[in-house]
Amino acid sequence: MKIEINHQSVNMPSGISILDACKSANINIPTLCYLEDLFPSGSCRMCVVEIAGNKNLVTSCSTQITEGMKIFTHSNRVIAARKSILELLLSNHPDDCLYCDKNNTCELQKLSAELGVRNRNFSKQLIEKEIDKSSPSLIRDPSKCILCGRCVRVCEERQTVSAISFIKRGSQTKVTTAFDGGLNTSNCINCGQCAMVCPTGAIVEKNNIKDVLAALADKNKVVVVQHAPAISVTLGELFGFKPGSDVNGQMTAALRKMGFQFVFETSFSADVTIMEEASELVDRVKKGENLPLMTSCSPGWIKFVEHFYPEFLNNLSSCKSPQQMMGALIKNYWAFKKNINPRDVYSVSIMPCTAKKFEAGREEMITGGLADIDAVLTTRELAKMIDMFNINLAKLKPEDADDPLGEHSSAAKLFGVTGGVAEAALRTAAFLITNDDSQVHEIHEYRDLEGIKELTVTIAGITLKTVVISGLSNARLVLDDIKRGIKQYHFIEVMTCPGGCIAGGGQPFGLDKDRIVARMKALYQIDKNEKIRKSHHNKDVVKLYEEFLMHPLSQKSHELLHTKYKPRTGY
Amino acid sequence: MLIIFPRIILTLFSICDIIHIVMLNTDKNGDCMSKQNTNITVTSLLKKFPKANRGDLIPILQCVQEAEKFLSKNAMMEIGDFLKLPLSKVYGVATFYNQFKFHPPGKYQIQICRGTACHVEGSSTILAALISDLKINTGETTPDGLFSLEVVACIGACGLAPVMSINGEFFAKLTTEKIKHIIQDFRDKEASNE
Ligand code: SF4
Ligand code: SF4
Ligand code: SF4
Ligand code: FES
């Protein structure tokens, strides 16, 4: 189909929106409510364009191109319209930029700069709205909300949780939970996907930097830190590295510079998770019990099952997540080896995820009277801390993590992407079943960002039906199919966030696909380059079993590394 | 802000749903009202909607409010379960319409007029005085169950502006002073009754 954009003639496939056509012609149109892959709501009108012969401006996100269409994306009229829409939105905005968590990453702020809004054309009509600090994961400030609806749609359509919705109308309209209570009274699973898409500072992570700084300043504390597999391939973006850069070594160096005494990698405990979970899988398959086995490393998913599908609680692996396993091992294994009183240890984790903050606070996550984890920081908070210490990440010499909890296989790194846990688990399960270690299974069927990926594998005559899921709307589809008896599986991997941890709610804001793909490729590249590619080849994990845990699923493992779940109510 | 209205609606329902709601609104309503009975529980009310779907939300809300005088949390939860609708959506739709109440009516139901004439005569200060005296917002009921406060559009007594009614009785030419006395009188009356 031939169309004309800003006097340039271009060929486009029919059936696409003006916005998409412009995008592929490398012309950027500002948007505030548009979300890739979701049906356009056309509510913010920021994306308006002019079309020759058309009296009114049209919203480019919700209008399809037609043959011969002449589009003007930045005519005077268009720019004036966008500017006045923005000025209207700003008429009840607090202009708090200096004190706002979103300062420098805010889409509203960026648009105001782009459109040259430099004074108020409408008098300020602030409506005081209460800040919701009730959630362990997120903070909502409705006075900064521009009612674009992105969060509501992500929560409803991508996660099928619907913890938040619009209430009331007119100037009273607000995005909030049922009965307008705190997020902690709702069935919010803390995934933070709403924060990822919010164009303003109305939803951000609960910031725990202060707690960590206080611990670092406390001379009686031994402050240790672990970072999750997905952090090393995303942190760099916040410091100008190109998407997909692996800054593992620089990050470790930066953490030491800030005063963390020991730097560990959650990938170590991801290897432990695989040892336990693969054994659990083989065990359950042999006994034919509680199948399908469902992974348990994603805390949003766990809470989702607790709220919406309690009938599947027994199917969840009893393994704690790698974050929590690491926490328990630090205070109950490493501290004793090091002759450190576990009470003096302050254990921090750097996570791609806001739900990890909730998970760390769960009552089940206390071992021997001590919380496994003391503070959780997201990738974004880590970046803020690095800035606070004026550290130039690019100039740091890469350093290695501390032994023994810093050692990892590349299978563990794959925990950062959808399909990675299943791939890592199958590598080890194959060995457990066959005792044959001659080849590394690269499972390419799992290696993309699709929401549901099915695969049947046969290992030494044992057939395993597996499915890999990311995004809870997809999980809902699969669970409903299982309930109706349409589908049967042995093993299900679920990651709450579409794409997995590389697109988790604690990662750099925005859900730009190209960036997510670059991060995914980086993780598979790391796997390709690595010599140790299977969890059971991690020497320090082998040693951990020899000298402490004895064997997977041992009594000691159960005490430290496994947990229970409970049905939950909430709305 | 012209854009707000369609924005909300579109997010809550598809267009078809809305048409559906409007249609059901008219035909199922009458049936519900004819069987007024304050003792029926929400569960049994829901039995009147055997093939209900999301589009029946508004008639169901109306039906339940008719019977119970307001929409309790429990009622909304039950309706949500029944229609397989997330509670945030049920609450969102219910709060969109002025007709729905979320608190049981007080023994004395205060309706303050915010029509044009009353507005000109200063009804906003009267409302503020009521809010501060009763310590509740509009749409709420005092914890002792005595007063509920509601804002209404013109009640056709513009000559008396600013005006309010309590259980149907009109109070005219209000001032903040008068408000204090009126409310105190009701409180005294209640105290002497006990
Ligand atoms: S939300 Fe954006 S525009 Fe509003 S105060 Fe924060 S940074 Fe500034
Ligand atoms: S954190 Fe997730 S579940 Fe909670 S409101 Fe946001 S999108 Fe919904
Ligand atoms: S909270 Fe953010 S994403 Fe949600 S409607 Fe408001 S501005 Fe949009
Ligand atoms: S992005 Fe098109 S209307 Fe909001």
Image (cartoon, coloured by chain):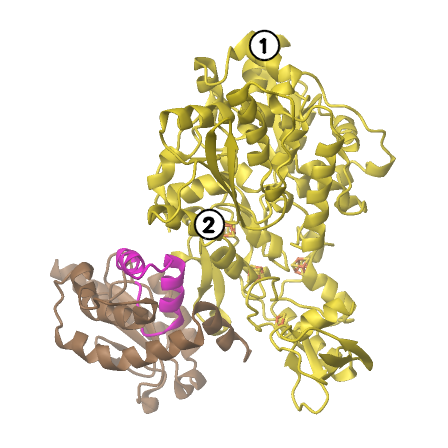
Chain colours: A yellow, B brown
Residue that label 1 marks: A336
- Answer with the quadrant where ligand 4 appears in the image: bottom right
User: Mark 2 vs ligand 2: CB under 8 Å?
Assistant: yes
- Residue beneath disc 2: A183
> Left or right: where does residue A273 sit relative to residue B127?
right
Residue at the far right: name it: A395
**Outermost residue, front side:** A461
- Residue in front for this viewpoint, A490 or A354: A490
Tag nearer the camera, 1 or 2: 1
The answer to whether dots 1 and 2 both sit on one chain is yes
- Residue B180 in the image: state x and y as whole percent: 32, 69
Residue type at the position of mark 2: Leu
Indicate whether A382 appears above or below A366: below
Helix, strand or loop: magenta stretch: helix
The stretch of residues the image draws in magenta is B73-102
SS category of the residue bearing label 2 = helix
Count of marks placed on residues? 2
Q: Earlier in the sequence, mark 1 or mark 2?
A: 2
Give the amino acid at mark 1.
Phe
Name the chain under label 1: A
Q: Is residue B105 left or right of residue A90?
A: left
Residue A139 on image: x %, y %: 55, 49
Q: Based on the displayed image, in which of its 4 quarters is residue A313 positioned? A: top left
Identity of the residue drawn at 60% across and 58% down = A198
Q: Residue at x 62, y 65 (%)?
A: A93
